[in-house]
Image: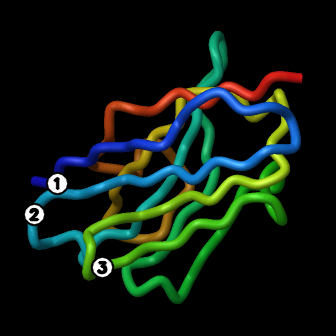
Amino acid sequence: QVQLVESGGGLVQAGGSLRLSCAASGRTFSSYAMGWFRQAPGKEREFVAVISRSGGSIYYADSVKGRFTISRSNAKNTVYLQMNTLKPEDTAVYYCAAAPGVAAQVSDYSYWGQGTQVTVSS
């Protein structure tokens, strides 16, 4: 069992930055690939980024490539999402999730956090 708690969301102007954190409970954090997803009102949850168990493999959605950076600290049981050059279309609830391996589909993830709201004003 893995429990995930996101933090760091908020309101920011377009062009600004935010850093999301996701703290995981338990001793098995390093056994999971960690992903970030987001869901805007009226839309399906979509993949943002994923990082492998060791951090050696990273993938991003095209919409955030070059602006967002995912990282993790297995010593701190935490995964991060640094978001730069934010746009109004980045507004969504952001979720972290854990999966047995690197994946981009919602259905591949076993554990989810409660989400944190990110709002980007124009």
Q: Residues within 10 Å of mark 2 (few under 14, many from 20)?
A: few
Residue shown at 46% from the left, 32% from the top: 116
Residue 69 position within the rendered picture, expressed as x and y whole percent measured from the top left? 66, 66
Picture colour scheme:
rainbow
First along the sequence among labels 3 and 2: 2
First along the sequence among labels 3 and 1: 1
68 vs 121, left or right, is left
Quarter of the image holding residue 27?
Answer: bottom left
Residue shown at 80% from the left, 59% from the top: 67
**Badge count:** 3
Residue shown at 29% from the left, 44% from the top: 5
Residue 72 position within the rendered picture, expressed as x and y whole percent measured from the top left? 43, 73
Three-letter amino acid code at the position of disc 2: Gly
Q: Which mark is residue 26?
A: 2
| SS of the residue under disc 3 | loop
The CA distance from mark 3 to mark 2 is 11 Å
The CA distance from mark 2 to mark 1 is 6 Å
| SS of the residue under disc 1 | loop
Three-letter amino acid code at the position of disc 3: Asn
The CA distance from mark 3 to mark 1 is 14 Å
Q: Which residue corresponds to mark 3?
A: 74
Q: Which residue corresponds to mark 1?
A: 2
Mark 3 vs 2: CB contact within 8 A: no
Q: Residues within 10 Å of mark 1 (few under 14, many from 20)?
A: some
Residue 64 position within the rendered picture, expressed as x and y whole percent measured from the top left? 78, 53
Choose between 9 and 55: the one closer to the eye.
Answer: 9
Three-letter amino acid code at the position of disc 1: Val
Choose between 81 and 18: the one closer to the eye.
Answer: 18
| SS of the residue under disc 2 | loop
First along the sequence among labels 2 and 1: 1
